[in-house]
Amino acid sequence: MSRRSLVKLAGAAGAWLTAGGLLAACGGTAGSSNPPATASSKPAAAGSSPAGATAGSKTEAASPAPSQAAAAAGASAPPAPKSWDELLAAAKAEGKVVVTGAPDPNTRQNLPAAFKQRFGIDLEYLPDATAVTARLQGERAAGQYNLDAEINGSDSVYVTLYANGWLDPFKSALLLPEAADASKWKPGGPWFRDPKGDTVLQLFATASPNVTLNADVVKPTDIPTGDSLLDPKWKGKICAFDPSVNGAGLAIGSALYVAKGEDYVSKLYKGQNVVLTRDYKQLADWIAHGNYPIGLAVPQNYLDDYVKAGLKFAQPELPDAPDGTNGGFGLLVVLNRAPHPNAARVFANWMASPEGMTIYSKTQFQVPVRSDIDPNWLPPRVIPKPGVKYLDTYDYEFQTKQRTNIRQFYEKLLK
């Protein structure tokens, strides 16, 4: 079969993929996991990073917890049962759990089936957590409380759910032994990212390549540094997910902004006539077909069908513009006033366990933050390296302070 036919085949196969944006990394060749935490590890403080994986950003002022008015907007669920057996029995009595998360078809199929098989509890899965979250304001104002839990990105979780006081803490409800074992988490314990350290659990920490190349058109040696992207010969040949809106584009745009400054990103995005899109599949198609052979903020899972068809891509490591890390659709939260509060807690325990996190990681092409999971389905390129300082784009302070200012900068630059 010709290369042209393979590309057409890959495009057809990819059409059924989800249209939502994923902050995910490409699956493919085998890679080794990060060194496991020692058995003597202690639970990490809120906001701490996995050892040797990420480094959080510093900001001038601490971000506030939800306001008293927001916290009063929702009533907390009844106290969780004190043992796992009691919790599971209460969840089975409720009969089901309603969850929203990543929009891809693999997640929609695999999570409900595996959860049902393990616990005998139905999992109603609502795809596209970003859209579902956007509807909650109106639903809650109308007294409708239909959602139990979410696995979502940092924008929706921090800026909408947490800030409005719509979440219940669930750290004390991690009763499943394999979920709560602190020694099996890279940060030294379940990685809660909210200021109180008990409400927003991060499941993934993946190194996100800033740049993706169509290796048949542009060689990695052509882009040895971030500065090389400013070479006039690349003008009009670069595409990117729009960094002026929340999503992968802003995450990568933030990493470049922090590493290189305003003047650099202005020369890059504006001076090089970078072509922008808010469609992840379109971005992958542009790279694969060579329309724009250099891409910024390309979610690697959208290239997977092209990789299977034989196309080659490269993600050069830029010494002057290091990657950031992200959690994708990997922030786990439990809603207050949930219709099935105990089933929501069982789901949270399962997602924090090796079984649930592995199943979900494989659909998302993301690196688990548990040290007892070997992500051998991922390429080494996306696994954070010990000793490397990455911009932690899911750090609460960075997300709620610095990132907002960066997004506003890009809005002004690219309007």
Image (cartoon, rainbow, N blue to C red):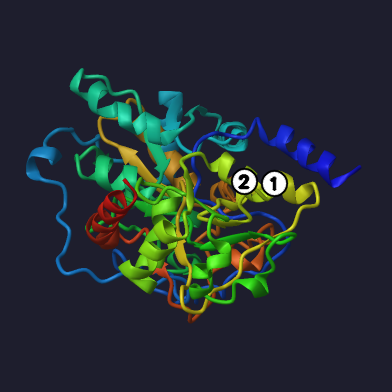
Asked whether residue 62 is in view, the answer is yes
In the rendered image, the quadrant that contains the N terminus is top right
Circle 2: residue type: Trp
Residue 56 placed where, x, y %?
A: 34, 69
Residue located 28% across and 48% down the image:
158
**74 relative position to 49: left or right:** left
Q: Which residue does the numbered mark 1 point to in the structure image?
A: 289
Q: Quadrant of the C terminus?
A: top left
Q: Which residue is drawn at 33% across and 47% down?
A: 155
Q: Which one is in front, 40 or 275?
A: 275
Q: Is mark 1 on a helix, strand or loop?
A: helix
Residue 246 point in image, percent of width and height: 36, 46
Residue beneath the point at 25% across and 71% down:
58
Mark 2 neighbour class, 10 Å CA radius: few under 14, some 14 to 19, many 20 or more: some
Camera-nearest residue between 331 and 322: 322
Q: Residue 286 carries which label?
A: 2
Residue type (three-letter) at the residue carrying disc 1: His
Residue in front for this viewpoint, 132 or 374: 132
Front position in the image: 201 or 219: 219
Residue 78 x %, y %:
24, 35
| Callout 1 crowding tier (Cα within 10 Å): few <14, some 14–19, many ≥20 | some
Q: What separation in Å lies between label 1 and label 2 (alpha carbons)? A: 5 Å
Q: Quadrant of residue 110?
A: top right
Location of residue 410 by image quarter: bottom left
Question: Extreme front residue here?
Answer: 232
Q: Do callouts 1 and 2 mark residues in contact (Cβ within 8 Å)?
A: yes
**Mark 2 secondary-structure assignment:** helix
